[in-house]
Amino acid sequence: MSEEKIEQDTGSEEPSPHRLIGTLAVAGLLSGIIIIAIYLVTFETIKENKARELRESVFRVLPDATKMQKLLLKEGKLVVSYKEEKGEEPIYAGYDDNDKFVGYAIPSDGPGFADTISVLYGYRPADRKVIGMWILASRETPGLGDKIYKDAAFVANFDDLAIDPPIVATKKGKSKPNEIDAITGATISSVAVAKIINKGNAYWVSKLPEPGNEPAYEVPAAHTASSGAVDTQAP
Amino acid sequence: MAKEKLAYDEFMKGLWRENPVFVQVLGLCPLLAVTNSAVNGLAMGLASFFVLLGSSILVSLLKNYIPKQVRISCFIIIIATFVTVVDYTLAAAMPVIHKDLGAFIPLIVCNCLILGRMEAFASRNTLRMSVADAFGMGAGFLFALVALGAVREIFGVGELFGITLFGPNFEPWVIMILPPGGFITLGVMLLYFNWVEEKKNKIDKQLAAEDGVN
């Protein structure tokens, strides 16, 4: 009997399993509430940041464009889209002040040296040339691989680049219209960018309409209020 | 007055005498990974500082309500919540820095410095002292990150906070911005700190001996 009592005494100093589980449950609950709160508070701002970044990137890779709209492939045809749809694979069309079509801005991604590289590049179907390139996301080595967006000379490689035959990165100094100069010390990252653009072309070029038949610019009169609408004017 | 002096002592302890990086050798993973430039080191240091301070305050306030059997789990929950808040706040307010720091913001949770201070200090001391300790350790960590980042950026790229320091003929010491450079730089700094510590001990001993003679 006395043994039992001693056991009970030491037992009462330790918190019960209910207390332990309860503490963790409360901690988890509060943590969850705070995380949901911060997510909701920052949601709109983060979405706007992403949209603004995209807008700026599109105008960067399509030099003469002042307006843009988002296009989706629906039943083999490109249609203008204002809503955000799940799992969509958009490309963007840029137009100048006279609503004349300038080119497509095509997003593509692929493995780089460190992690996936996300690229947006401008494509002019009339002469089948890449007319601009911008890195949307990369985790390449700072000081080496990150030159794919920090080195103006490398980015300029893509201002007037033929896509037939597919783009090749060369170390020895480019001589052909489809060649780019790889960055010294960042060959893999440079080659990755070329491969990513080739991959984008392999997917999209055959699906694009004939030059001259691109979707016309539609003034977004009634659509601006819908959530996820892409702001089409240049900043 | 004595209490105030103690709080100041706690702060200086974290900043220098028990610097989390150069003396305790903690938090090396984020340290080596994000110090390829001074501004990245600064951003990571500030993010870690905020998490350390917030977690210390909360743990110190709740220390009597958290049973010791589940204390580590609770500390992690608290730290992870703060890190998530920092992550989303940076993504909204400073998207460029958020992009640069990338995957290392969530990794602040694994920073053993923060969990270590919760266990060693915040869960056993008053709120006031815990805040002082968090400030000290956070400042010490920030100092280490910026120092390391600055050295690696200067030698590895020839810039500091993005400002080019040398002329076009400067040949950057590329290894400095790669992992081996991080280890080497840290090693040199640890060497320096240990040397200073030894010298100080020698001088203290000498003074004590002289006092004894007198």
Image: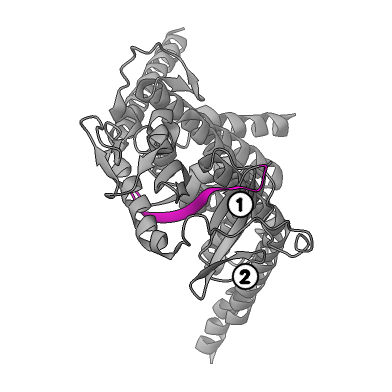
Tell me which residue sits at (30%, 23%) in the image. B173
* Camera-nearest residue between A1 and B41: B41
Q: Quadrant of residue A161?
A: top left
* Camera-nearest residue between B133 and A171: A171
Q: Which residue is mark 1?
A: A50
Q: Is residue B172 above or below residue A224?
A: above
**How many residues crowd mark 1 within 10 Å: few (<14), some (14–19), many (20+)?**
some
What main secondary structure does the magenta stretch of the protein show?
strand
* Camera-nearest residue between B108 and A216: A216
**How many residues crowd mark 2 within 10 Å: few (<14), some (14–19), many (20+)?**
some
Sequence-wise, the earlier of marks 1 and 2 is 2
Q: Is residue B54 above or below residue B40?
A: below
Q: Are marks 1 and 2 on the same chain?
A: yes
- Magenta-highlighted residues: A97-114
* Camera-nearest residue between A199 and A205: A205
Tag 2: amino acid:
Gly
Q: Is residue A83 left or right of residue B192?
A: right
- Residue B131 percent location from the top left of the image: 66, 42
Q: Which residue is mark 2?
A: A28
Residue A99: say if magenta. yes
Residue A92 seen in the figure: yes
Q: Given the image, what chain letter belongs to the residue carrying mark 1? A: A
Residue B89: say if magenta. no
The alpha-carbon separation of the residues under discs 1 and 2 comes to 30 Å
Label 2 sits on a secondary structure element that is helix
In this view, which residue lies farthest toward the top? B214
